[in-house]
Protein backbone atom coordinates (compact mmCIF):
# COMPACT_ATOMS: atom_id res chain seq x y z
CA UNK A 1 0.00 0.00 0.00
CA UNK A 2 2.84 2.39 0.80
CA UNK A 3 4.50 1.44 -2.48
CA UNK A 4 1.38 2.30 -4.44
CA UNK A 5 0.88 5.62 -2.69
CA UNK A 6 4.46 6.87 -2.27
CA UNK A 7 6.53 4.74 -4.63
CA UNK A 8 10.13 3.76 -4.07
CA UNK A 9 10.86 6.64 -1.70
CA UNK A 10 8.00 5.63 0.63
CA UNK A 11 9.09 1.98 0.65
CA UNK A 12 12.70 2.97 1.29
CA UNK A 13 11.63 5.20 4.17
CA UNK A 14 9.58 2.42 5.79
CA UNK A 15 12.46 -0.05 5.45
CA UNK A 16 14.89 2.54 6.84
CA UNK A 17 12.67 2.98 9.90
CA UNK A 18 12.63 -0.78 10.42
CA UNK A 19 16.43 -0.80 10.06
CA UNK A 20 16.57 1.87 12.78
CA UNK A 21 14.41 -0.28 15.07
CA UNK A 22 16.64 -3.31 14.46
CA UNK A 23 19.80 -1.25 15.00
CA UNK A 24 18.50 0.08 18.33
CA UNK A 25 17.54 -3.46 19.36
CA UNK A 26 21.02 -4.73 18.56
CA UNK A 27 22.54 -1.83 20.48
CA UNK A 28 20.39 -2.70 23.50
CA UNK A 29 21.48 -6.32 23.10
CA UNK A 30 25.15 -5.33 23.35
CA UNK A 31 24.46 -3.04 26.34
CA UNK A 32 22.60 -5.70 28.33
CA UNK A 33 24.30 -6.39 31.64
CA UNK A 34 23.19 -10.01 32.04
CA UNK A 35 22.79 -13.01 29.78
CA UNK A 36 19.03 -13.24 30.22
CA UNK A 37 18.51 -9.65 29.05
CA UNK A 38 20.78 -10.23 26.06
CA UNK A 39 18.87 -13.37 25.09
CA UNK A 40 15.50 -11.63 25.38
CA UNK A 41 16.75 -8.67 23.33
CA UNK A 42 18.18 -11.01 20.69
CA UNK A 43 14.90 -12.90 20.48
CA UNK A 44 12.91 -9.70 20.03
CA UNK A 45 15.27 -8.43 17.32
CA UNK A 46 15.09 -11.82 15.61
CA UNK A 47 11.30 -11.79 15.79
CA UNK A 48 11.08 -8.35 14.19
CA UNK A 49 13.64 -9.24 11.50
CA UNK A 50 11.87 -12.50 10.65
CA UNK A 51 8.46 -10.85 10.40
CA UNK A 52 9.88 -8.02 8.32
CA UNK A 53 11.72 -10.28 5.86
CA UNK A 54 8.80 -12.67 5.43
CA UNK A 55 6.26 -9.89 4.93
CA UNK A 56 8.45 -7.96 2.47
CA UNK A 57 9.20 -11.20 0.63
CA UNK A 58 5.48 -11.96 0.37
CA UNK A 59 4.75 -8.45 -0.85
CA UNK A 60 7.29 -8.51 -3.66
CA UNK A 61 6.32 -12.07 -4.63
CA UNK A 62 9.45 -14.09 -3.87
CA UNK A 63 8.00 -15.98 -0.88
CA UNK A 64 4.74 -17.87 -0.40
CA UNK A 65 1.80 -16.01 1.10
CA UNK A 66 1.46 -16.59 4.86
CA UNK A 67 -0.38 -14.78 7.60
CA UNK A 68 2.63 -13.04 9.14
CA UNK A 69 1.95 -9.31 9.54
CA UNK A 70 4.48 -6.51 9.21
CA UNK A 71 5.21 -5.33 12.79
CA UNK A 72 3.45 -2.06 13.70
CA UNK A 73 2.19 -1.65 10.15
CA UNK A 74 -0.19 -4.43 9.14
CA UNK A 75 -3.73 -4.57 10.42
CA UNK A 76 -4.16 -6.74 13.51
CA UNK A 77 -4.67 -5.75 17.11
CA UNK A 78 -3.01 -8.71 18.80
CA UNK A 79 0.13 -8.40 16.66
CA UNK A 80 0.49 -4.71 17.48
CA UNK A 81 -0.13 -5.39 21.18
CA UNK A 82 2.52 -8.12 21.33
CA UNK A 83 5.01 -5.98 19.41
CA UNK A 84 4.49 -3.11 21.85
CA UNK A 85 4.99 -5.51 24.77
CA UNK A 86 8.21 -6.76 23.18
CA UNK A 87 9.44 -3.18 22.72
CA UNK A 88 8.56 -2.53 26.37
CA UNK A 89 10.84 -5.43 27.34
CA UNK A 90 13.58 -3.91 25.19
CA UNK A 91 13.15 -0.58 26.97
CA UNK A 92 13.33 -2.32 30.35
CA UNK A 93 16.56 -4.08 29.37
CA UNK A 94 17.98 -0.75 28.20
CA UNK A 95 17.04 1.08 31.41
CA UNK A 96 18.47 -1.71 33.58
CA UNK A 97 21.68 -1.64 31.56
CA UNK A 98 22.00 2.09 32.15
CA UNK A 99 21.12 1.85 35.84
CA UNK A 100 23.76 -0.77 36.63
CA UNK A 101 26.59 1.59 35.73
CA UNK A 102 25.41 4.35 38.08
CA UNK A 103 26.11 4.51 41.78
CA UNK A 104 23.06 4.46 44.02
CA UNK A 105 22.33 7.82 45.59
CA UNK A 106 22.25 7.79 49.36
CA UNK A 107 19.86 10.18 51.04
CA UNK A 108 21.53 12.28 53.69
CA UNK A 109 19.74 13.74 56.67
CA UNK A 110 20.22 17.48 56.89
Image: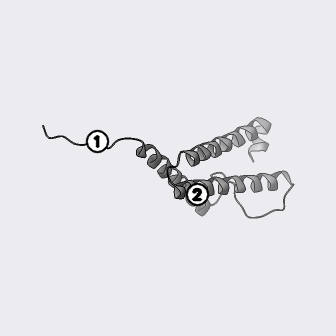
Tell me if mark 1 has few (under 14), some (14-19) or many (20+) residues whose alpha carbon lies within 10 angstroms of its own: few
Image check: 66 left or right of 96? right
- Pick the quarter of the image with the C terminus: top left
Q: Secondary structure at mark 2?
A: helix
Percent of width and height locating residue 1: 75, 48
Q: Earlier in the sequence, mark 2 or mark 1?
A: 2
Q: In the current view of this chain or complex, which residue is farthest to the top?
A: 9
Circle 2 crowding by C-alpha within 10 Å: few under 14, some 14–19, many from 20: few
Residue topped by disc 2: 39
Q: Position of residue 30 (x, y in %)?
A: 58, 46
Q: Residue at x 64, y 42 (%)?
A: 23
**Is 53 placed above or below 108 here?**
below
Compared with residue 46, is residue 110 higher up or lower down, i.e. above or below? Answer: above
- Image color mode: one colour
Please tell me which residue is depicted at 57% across the width and 60% down the height of the picture. 82
Q: Find the residue positioned furthest to the right.
A: 62
Q: Residue at x 87, y 55 (%)?
A: 62
Helix, strand or loop at mark 1: loop
| Quadrant of the image occupied by residue 12 | top right
Instruction: Locate residue 52, reporting x and y percent.
Output: 72, 52
Q: Relative to 8, is 74 on the left or the right?
A: left
Q: Position of residue 38 (x, y in %)?
A: 56, 53
**Front residue of this view, candidates 59 and 99:** 99
Q: Is residue 61 above or below residue 106?
A: below
Rounded to the nearest whole Å, what is the CA distance between mark 2 and mark 1? 30 Å
The residue indicated by pointer 1 is 105
Residue 4 appears in which quarter of the rendering?
A: top right
On the picture, is 109 further left or further right than 55?
left
Amino acid sequence: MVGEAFGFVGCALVLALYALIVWRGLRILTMAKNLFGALIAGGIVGMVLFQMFVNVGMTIGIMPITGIPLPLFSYGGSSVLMTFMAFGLLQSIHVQGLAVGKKPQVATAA
